[in-house]
Image (cartoon, rainbow, N blue to C red):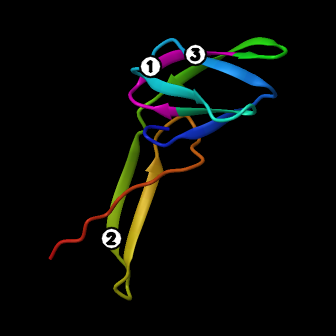
Amino acid sequence: MLGRPSNIAYINGIKTVKNSNSSVATAKKKDSYDIVLKAKKQGTTKVTYKTKYGTGTLNVKVIKPKFDIKLSESVNGDLLITVKNNNKDVFNYVKFTITYKN
């Protein structure tokens, strides 16, 4: 989750959102139905939100992803990228950047 904003909640009637540890992640109200989290660094934080129906909390744990990435050339000369997830967690989205040099 590091660096990429994620809509993590669909809650009706959100009025306010507060975060206990903004150095780990930011939490913002997108509209009256969504809370958007953006991870900054590894750690934990507690997000408290108020709705017209009451108050709720989300306990958020940000982890540093552990991946093994191998680059190899296939038989026909194409670049093959192999990514192995060494985490106990499952990620919906992973983004990496490749820089080609001579």
Q: What amino acid is found at the position of numbered circle 3 in the picture?
A: Lys
Q: Position of residue 40 (x, y in %)?
A: 40, 30
Q: Nearer the viewer, mark 2 or mark 1?
A: 1
Q: Nearer the viewer, residue 82 or 46?
A: 46
For residue 53, side relative to residue 86 (left or right): right
Q: Position of residue 82 (x, y in %)?
A: 42, 62
Residue assigned mark 3: 18
Q: What amino acid is found at the position of numbered circle 1 in the picture?
A: Ser
Residue at 74 percent across and 24 percent down: it is 14
Picture quadrant of residue 79: bottom left
User: What's the mark number on residue 22?
Assistant: 1
Residue at 69 percent across and 35 percent down: it is 31
> Residue 89 colored magenta?
no
Q: Earlier in the sequence, mark 2 or mark 3?
A: 3
Estimate the spatial distance between the alpha carbons at disc 1 and disc 3, rounded to whole Å: 9 Å
Picture quadrant of residue 51: top right
Estimate the spatial distance between the alpha carbons at disc 2 and disc 3, rounded to whole Å: 46 Å
For residue 75, side relative to residue 32 (left or right): left
Residue assigned mark 2: 72
Q: Residue furthest left?
A: 102
> In the rendered view of the protein, which quadrant contains the C terminus?
bottom left
Span of residues in magenta: 38-49
